Image (spheres, grey):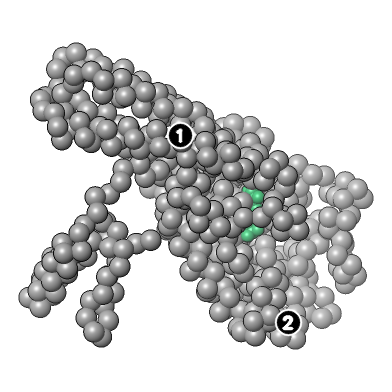
Amino acid sequence: MKIYNTLTKNKEEFKPLREGEVSMYVCGPTVYNLIHIGNARPMIIFDTFRRYMEYKGYKVNYVSNFTDVDDKIIKAANAEGVDSSVISERYIKECKKDMQAMNVREATTHPKATCEIDGMIAMISTLIEKGHAYVAADGTVYFRTRSFNEYGKLSHKNLDDLQSGGRSLLVTGEDQKEDPLDFVLWKPKKEGEPYWESPWCQGRPGWHIECSVMSKRYLGDTIDIHAGGEDLIFPHHENEIAQSEAANGVPFAHYWMHNAFLNIDNKKMSKSLGNFFTVRDISEKYDLQILRFFMLSAHYRSPLNFSDSLMESAKNSLERITNCVSALSFAIENKSGELTEEEKALLEQAKGYQTAFEEAMEDDCNTADAISSVFELVKFANQALKEERSAAFYKELKENILTLCDILGLIVEKKEELLDEEIENLIAQRQQARKDKDFAKADEIRDLLKEKGILLEDTREGVKWKRES
Ligand code: AMP
Ligand code: ZN
């Protein structure tokens, strides 16, 4: 597997720290609002990367945080007159709903910054002890950027250029800093803000420290892959490297992967330009599988333009796959027979498309080319459907297509819907199993219903059910 590493600006062979395992950390959203389709890009891309690594047999430990303390959250909370946790919990829940609709799997761990304050205080204390951080008169703690010799190695920026040319990037008018390059690790509370006790002042952490701490806690001092959108390279990821490596004394992440931006009608997506869509907005018009397909139709390091016409064409393309899969299902049910020698030879050809798919994914997760291989396979299957073939042959082709689509996280087979009566029946069987203390059976029935998109809720009036929307 080759990965383009922002750190070295090269495509490199992926060598995991531990044989057969991948540890990866993906910077997640700040939860003050519904997520927008730009936030969805890294979610979909790195979820697909994870699925491919699992397909290859790796055990992937995937950590993605929720930033739940931040100026924007506090502002939203104050505007509604509620605690900032009300805002962040609300939008974490909504974000998880969107993730599910996009078939983005839950991370192994989704840590929240506010639950990791102790770890942040510990790391900041270490940085102070080692001379990499200092406390200003008002209790603000700053990272002493020049004390970390390799600062700038990820964004390929030179410290002196940053100081002169890029001053505006860094200087925030805080004259208590020893150096304008220094950045905040801990800041004192302001009126109406959430705060925590610390050795320096009552206050809250800076944004960068949270990822250094959560990555260390859930994945260790050195991890395989750290990822996020390209806007995070500087200063966020640069600062994470400085904090982590200065505190831990070992390399932070071996590979740095960054997705390019999603634009709208060839313009940067922004609220002020009015060209801003949440994932929820899109879900009103399209099945979010189409959004997922659209995101994967370009290489993750290329900018991607969002427009209605591109979504329409994504919709048509995805339909070509789903139509082929249902035609194969129909053929499987209505034909019979085992594989013939000729069909075995044909399947070898079909295997070539799977190999091409894998080669594309091995080449820095080239989902655009991988999708082309799926279409080759679909074309091949459509041709086979015009011929007289055995049920076993169609079954193999269908499984091949489903395997590749599953790696891409695309759901291309419509689940058979259960009738209301069948659901009631299964629920009754589950109740009986519970009465009989046969919990394994009860769980089995619940899982079966879940698989069919039926959610159960135990209430005082009995078990209620609803279809997943
Ligand atoms: P934020 O909530 O702004 O911290 O963003 C969460 C994640 O979404 C980060 O990895 C960002 O880099 C990414 N992101 C934000 N906007 C876009 C966009 N327009 N295109 C692609 N990725 C984005
Ligand atoms: Zn981060």
Find numbered disc 2 in the image and state the secondary structure of the residue it sits on: loop
Please tell me in which quadrant of the rendered image residue 213 appears. Answer: bottom right
Q: How crowded is mark 2: few (under 14 residues within 10 Å), some or many (20 or more)?
A: some
Disc 1 residue type (three-letter): Ser
Residue lying at 56% horizontally and 35% vertically, measured from the top left: 298
Q: Which of 140 and 264 is in front in this view?
A: 264
Residue lying at 32% horizontally and 32% vertically, measured from the top left: 324
Question: Could you tell me how far apart the alpha carbons at marks 2 and 1 are, in whole angstroms?
Answer: 52 Å
Q: Residue 440 placed where, x, y %?
A: 15, 66
Q: Residue 193 placed where, x, y %?
A: 69, 82
Q: Residue 391 placed where, x, y %?
A: 16, 28
Q: Earlier in the sequence, mark 2 or mark 1?
A: 2
Using residue 104 as the reference point, say whether residue 213 is left or right of it.
Answer: right
Residue lying at 31% horizontally and 63% vertically, measured from the top left: 467
Residue matched to label 2: 189
Disc 2 residue type (three-letter): Lys
Using residue 70 as the reference point, say whether residue 13 is left or right of it.
Answer: left
Q: Residue 317 carries which label?
A: 1
Q: Which of 299 and 337 is in front in this view?
A: 337
Q: How crowded is mark 1: few (under 14 residues within 10 Å), some or many (20 or more)?
A: some
